[in-house]
Amino acid sequence: MGNSFGKLYTVTGFGESHSPAVGAVIDGCPAGIPLSELDIQPQLTRRRPGQNKYTTPRNEADSVRIVSGIDRGVTLGTPICMIVENTNQKPGDYAEMVPAPRPSHADFTYLQKFGVAASSGGGRASAREAIARVCGGALAEKILGAWFGMEFVAWVSSVGTIDAPEVDRETITRETIDESMIRCPDHETSEQMLELINNTRKSADSIGGQITGVIRNVPVGLGQPVFDKIEAILAQAMLSLPAVKGFEFGSGFKGSRMTGSQHNDLFVKKGETLGTATNRSGGIQGGISNGETIYFKVAFKPTATIGTAQMTADYDGNEIELIGKGRHDPCVVGRAVPMVESMAAMVMMDMVLQQRATNPSSLKYREA
Amino acid sequence: MGNSFGKLYTVTGFGESHSPAVGAVIDGCPAGIPLSELDIQPQLTRRRPGQNKYTTPRNEADSVRIVSGIDRGVTLGTPICMIVENTNQKPGDYAEMVPAPRPSHADFTYLQKFGVAASSGGGRASAREAIARVCGGALAEKILGAWFGMEFVAWVSSVGTIDAPEVDRETITRETIDESMIRCPDHETSEQMLELINNTRKSADSIGGQITGVIRNVPVGLGQPVFDKIEAILAQAMLSLPAVKGFEFGSGFKGSRMTGSQHNDLFVKKGETLGTATNRSGGIQGGISNGETIYFKVAFKPTATIGTAQMTADYDGNEIELIGKGRHDPCVVGRAVPMVESMAAMVMMDMVLQQRATNPSSLKYREA
Amino acid sequence: MGNSFGKLYTVTGFGESHSPAVGAVIDGCPAGIPLSELDIQPQLTRRRPGQNKYTTPRNEADSVRIVSGIDRGVTLGTPICMIVENTNQKPGDYAEMVPAPRPSHADFTYLQKFGVAASSGGGRASAREAIARVCGGALAEKILGAWFGMEFVAWVSSVGTIDAPEVDRETITRETIDESMIRCPDHETSEQMLELINNTRKSADSIGGQITGVIRNVPVGLGQPVFDKIEAILAQAMLSLPAVKGFEFGSGFKGSRMTGSQHNDLFVKKGETLGTATNRSGGIQGGISNGETIYFKVAFKPTATIGTAQMTADYDGNEIELIGKGRHDPCVVGRAVPMVESMAAMVMMDMVLQQRATNPSSLKYREA
Amino acid sequence: MGNSFGKLYTVTGFGESHSPAVGAVIDGCPAGIPLSELDIQPQLTRRRPGQNKYTTPRNEADSVRIVSGIDRGVTLGTPICMIVENTNQKPGDYAEMVPAPRPSHADFTYLQKFGVAASSGGGRASAREAIARVCGGALAEKILGAWFGMEFVAWVSSVGTIDAPEVDRETITRETIDESMIRCPDHETSEQMLELINNTRKSADSIGGQITGVIRNVPVGLGQPVFDKIEAILAQAMLSLPAVKGFEFGSGFKGSRMTGSQHNDLFVKKGETLGTATNRSGGIQGGISNGETIYFKVAFKPTATIGTAQMTADYDGNEIELIGKGRHDPCVVGRAVPMVESMAAMVMMDMVLQQRATNPSSLKYREA
């Protein structure tokens, strides 16, 4: 259970780090959308490890194959299954020989929950499950871009205690962000972050960070009252990502320090409709999009796998010294950027389909 | 859409601030649970406004009536409908005469989404929808208490810029918390908060705050991998509450500043099983409970309704000065405490039923 | 569990025969639909017992109250809760004193399933749960009538071994049907049926029957491939009704006796589009509506409650003679007609919302 | 939408007849179940065409590969993806060149619904989608057999107007059934059916038939009141199969001809519990299993593809003579037997998980 996301645009992921393949089945995609593997591969490649010295040295090809749901280059309205073979399994690397649950990993909880354990230790608690997210998200953002010009851009806004300065949420692009190895658009900060990560690697440790995301050109009226507010589903989406410890949108935690007169977004005329002079609401009011840019921040803890010795307990409760082996990233936030974008796109795609169901005429599409 | 929460323990809320009634239908409650209105009323009363001078002067009775699903004092395993009549409607108070969308309210987005507006302005965007949450949560916490001794306790940890000192998560009780008008268990901080709120009221403004919640005596193994991790569903639950801007659990945003060697929770023998020496994981690893206390923090923005004049725009885009009228709370966090507890209880109840479905023998119940 | 029907237009029923009230919460209803109790009451009244000497003498008022989701006469797009108080409970009539599970009732299975039993014996297995269906269906058919001119008409096509002659599916109306006490539109057959029912009552027995239903003016393209074909969801809907033993649509069981050349519906030009010369497909091809009239048949077993002595076993397995007491219908099919129509309307409403979600421009609405 | 079946044991199918692969993702399977391709392949092979001269001459290998969810021979509790490559695609055979919608096929409705058409004409309306059902069902019946000794057996009870005599529902086995080419356990009837099918093939026509199914050793208490009664979900399951026109269980349509005193099943002591002396209820009372054998019948129309010329209309409404080409079965019911068994197994697996969620102690497992 728990491997499907979305009510109408439903992405069901499958696969463990050591299974023959990982992938996703996407149900609810409208028909007639031009689609090929070339639409999905770029985001998959962006999340791939082994791209540079700052990330894990594993070189996973992550080549996606679409095995259903398209015909003559367009979607059929039927389930789209996307598969990535796990070509670079090295079962010996990981937990098989580990005589104890790795601290802050899922080894202990998976074993308790299921009564059995994958040879990799954590089963679905693998970075490779993110491939399903990226498959589902890349397709969603293609559609939303075509229909509304909707854009999903995320970047690293902090690594450890190094914070990037604010960027212009309305203009920042993926191209600018990808100029940085760590996907922090501020050049100077990016260099500092990379140095910190490099030092962390040398000390066989890991480091956390934060990602900021924006969603632009959002139609007014998306989201549902009460339990399926946009921010609620976005929060679920982001907290479902491995290693995430927190989520905030708009004014976020700082907003709780303010007064109403400081915080309220006053309405102003914007073109044919209303907008807000400020955007502390983060583009969402009463759980429903107001047309302003949605923005949010996601906090990632440091990776649990470290090369440093840790005094912990084995499954019988005996003290044991554990030293992490195998390939690992000292800092995952750079690679997590496309995952954040993908989850955001899946959320918005579902919200658009929901709005079409109950009030289709409220949506204005881009000129073809 | 979006008015049901939970896959197996499903709470469907209904009602607007000006409709004849509000309430909830709870489907999926096991049979044979002793239940009467007396089990629900206390939490409803705790969230009631009008309890003291610091909250809204409306005196809503909020007297709950259970109209189905119980017979001779126990649940039947059938849907339980709980209803609270809206006895204190004052339609004239609110938005009916308001010629403009209230800033940072749901008036504008609801109208855009639905094409019609409730006379109260925001429809379901009403504090009264929380009654459904409390109904569903009060029942859930009763069951979880009986089965596992599970406890749900939340309190106000900040108001504006005033932060309460850390409290002992393992021992803090609702009784202690309710000794404070603002539900902050530290006496001195509580006084400061109340003074700040009083001053805020005098200046016809409002102020935000934060709530910390804990869940104790959680069985190991609850939660689902990937999309339905406990923290993901808790995040959805909390962000679905009105005015919430952020959520974090365990080490939270601060955890993203740390290194892996600082952050990892080392395992130690605890009784017959393993526990962790520290609890930066917040009781959840890989999305699944590890038996330690779950804790989290929720940020609430200041209430949008303020008595101060605001220069905003009417529906046609003309500038207009708006002064909020009617009854309102300068600070809602005290009343939000039972809502936070209730949402947490609903999440955990659903997770327990899910775990029973796939691995029932993993759960150990309390001695009867 | 199992008390909600529909994915987007979701009707959640509640209430037992002896609970204070029964009702439904309808989520997913579009906003701006004119609605009052007057739209619902007529179908509720049609399913009411006590209308004539051929049905049960209980006179239940079944007066519906809408307590949420409407404002100033129109729907808000929020959940609509409809409640009917159980004013005529006579707890002593039914199973309380019954020392044994009534044959072919739900007493035994409910007790085994839930471990507890309602004082009425069967809990939700009560004719009164149908009120939720009628509430949800009456609203659905109002909307579908306004949007597409869709019509839902059902009638009694057999009682016991008495079959009515075929009627014209394209023109038969509820008015014609309601001229018959037993809702069989053929006058002569109706008289025979009523005589049979009367004789059955005299012999303290009960008798089964069949209902035929049609759905007219169905837009092309409704329904989903594979698991959510229209006929599949219709079948679930009908088999969920109490006492139903079978469902067929189009050529039905007889169609399985035919050859392809006899059975295939050839296409012909109909106005601007294609139709079929015959309609053995029953308006559905590949699970999707083709624009022709949908028709189907539902078989109801005889009511289990009879006044005749039955030799059966008590809960301990001892032989016991049981004589049914209390009020009961010798033949329920006449009253079941609005339930069949209501379930059909709920199915089609959900299908329409689903089609809007993925391909809204495929639907053509009636001129306003 | 509509490509997933089951609430807790969820089978999501994918693939068209001409896509690279077809398959299923099964979420909700408990962990620790021994599983390999060898558990699935036999049922897949049973539904394979090309096994004998009476079925389609296509020889599809249908070799299943499990690419996730198992490790060291047991299930992990994570999603199980099973894939069958479409190795024998012959795109030229089917509808590509067809200038008109094939009568009683899904070509017309799919095009209307989706606005695009698969080159095979019907997209998911392909016999190959059944592979997902068999994958999901074969796993389900393995688990239910191990836990409860539950058995699923279906056979052909009529072809055209040839009816097989009643068989003993309590003892009939798949082995006996598979001795017949057409899967009719009565030897003489089987011969007549095969002769009819052979003659039908010679006249380039097709013929319908009926399948009877039984489910034995069903625990008491499965199924949900109201909308998710066992018979309702079984009906959805069966009507979701291609070409199905009707479903009945227990006394079925004939039951509607009976009186209550004829129809009621009287209780008798059976071992430690109660059973019924007769079983017109078909093992289900009030939507919930009573421990007796569940039995039902499913009607299949004749295949729409026939080799005979048909006067129909093209997409523009012009008259056209169409002659079906390519490979086709004159009678699909023999091959549909494993599909019926598989759908029944998926339904019961879901019901078992649901019952475990709310009342796990009500279920008694087989001795290991």
Image: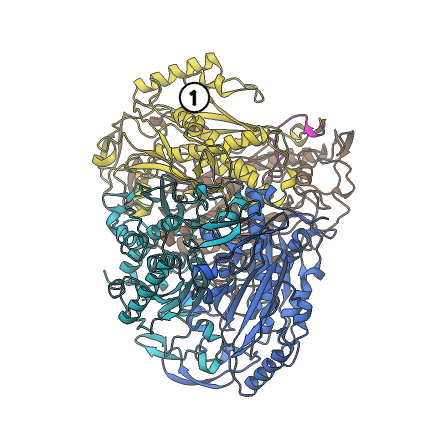
Chain colours: A brown, B yellow, C cyan, D blue
Q: In the structure shown, which secondary structural element does the residue marked by tag 1 occupy?
A: strand
Find disc 1 in the rendering and name its residue.
B159
Q: Which region of the structure is painted magenta?
A: B272-289
Please rate how many residues cluster around mark 1, counting C-alpha atoms within 10 Å: few if below 14, some from 14 to 19, many from 20.
many
Q: Which percent across, then down, holds residue A165?
A: 50, 33
Decide: is B124 above or below A17. above
Q: Which percent across, then down, holds residue A185?
A: 53, 40
Decide: is B222 above or below C195. above
- Rendering quarter of residue B288: top right
Looking at the image, how many numbered discs can be counted on the residues? 1
- Rendering quarter of residue C67: top left
Residue at the limit of the structure toward the top, as seen here: B188
Decide: is B154 above or below B71. above
- Rendering quarter of residue D26: bottom right
Residue C35 falls inside the magenta stretch:
no
Q: Nearer the viewer, residue D172 or A79?
A: D172
Q: Nearer the viewer, residue C28 or C344?
A: C344
Q: Which percent across, then down, holds residue C33?
A: 27, 51
Q: Residue at x 59, y 56 (%)?
A: D25
Q: Is residue A157 visible?
A: no
Amino acid, disc 1: Val
**Chain of residue at mark 1:** B
